[in-house]
Amino acid sequence: MSMNICGVLVRARPERRAAVVRALEAMPGVEVHAATEDGRIVVTLERAGRAGVADTLSEMHNVEGVLTAALVYEHSETGNETEAEPCD
């Protein structure tokens, strides 16, 4: 199984930013790196398998106050193989 490390840009309602950050930090494999006053939140997501990434992105979308959660970068490692995929 591959290990995926992803960069995600979350956009939240500014008045819900702090609650969204707390909810994201409580998710397994999610680390919040920055949050701006206008609701932009930069996170990394580390999960085994792409299904785990998709599940977590769906979970992020379901957090009250989240407007969008966009996958902007994905790095995948399988054993000795390494592949990086920019997300357009």
Image (tube, rainbow, N blue to C red):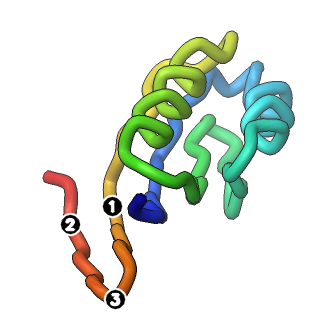
At label 2, the amino acid type is Glu
The Cα–Cα distance between marks 3 and 2, rounded to whole angstroms, is 17 Å
Q: Is residue 62 above or below residue 20?
A: above
Q: How crowded is mark 3: few (under 14 residues within 10 Å), some or many (20 or more)?
A: few
Q: What residue is at 42 percent from the left and 49 percent from the top?
A: 49
**SS assignment at label 3:** loop
> For the residues marked 1 and 2, what is the alpha-carbon distance in whole angstroms?
7 Å
Secondary structure type for disc 1: strand
Q: Please state which of residues 33 and 51 is positioned toward the viewer in this rendering.
A: 51
Element at label 2: strand
Which-is-in-front pick, marks 3 and 2? Answer: 3
Q: In which quarter of the image is residue 23?
A: top right
Residue contact between numbered discs 1 and 2, judged by CB atoms under 8 Å: yes
Please provide percent x and percent y for residue 28. 74, 44
Vertical placement of residue 66 versus 51, above or below: above
Q: Residue at x 75, y 37 (%)?
A: 27
Earlier residue among tags 1 and 3 = 1
Verify CB contact (< 8 Å) between mark 3 and mark 2. no
**Label 3: which residue?**
80
- Which of marks 2 and 3 precedes in the sequence? 3
Residue 10: which numbered mark, if any? none
Identify the disc placed on residue 85.
2
Q: Does residue 32 appear left or right of residue 39 in this picture?
A: right
Marking on residue 73: 1
Is 65 left, or right, of 53 in this rendering? right
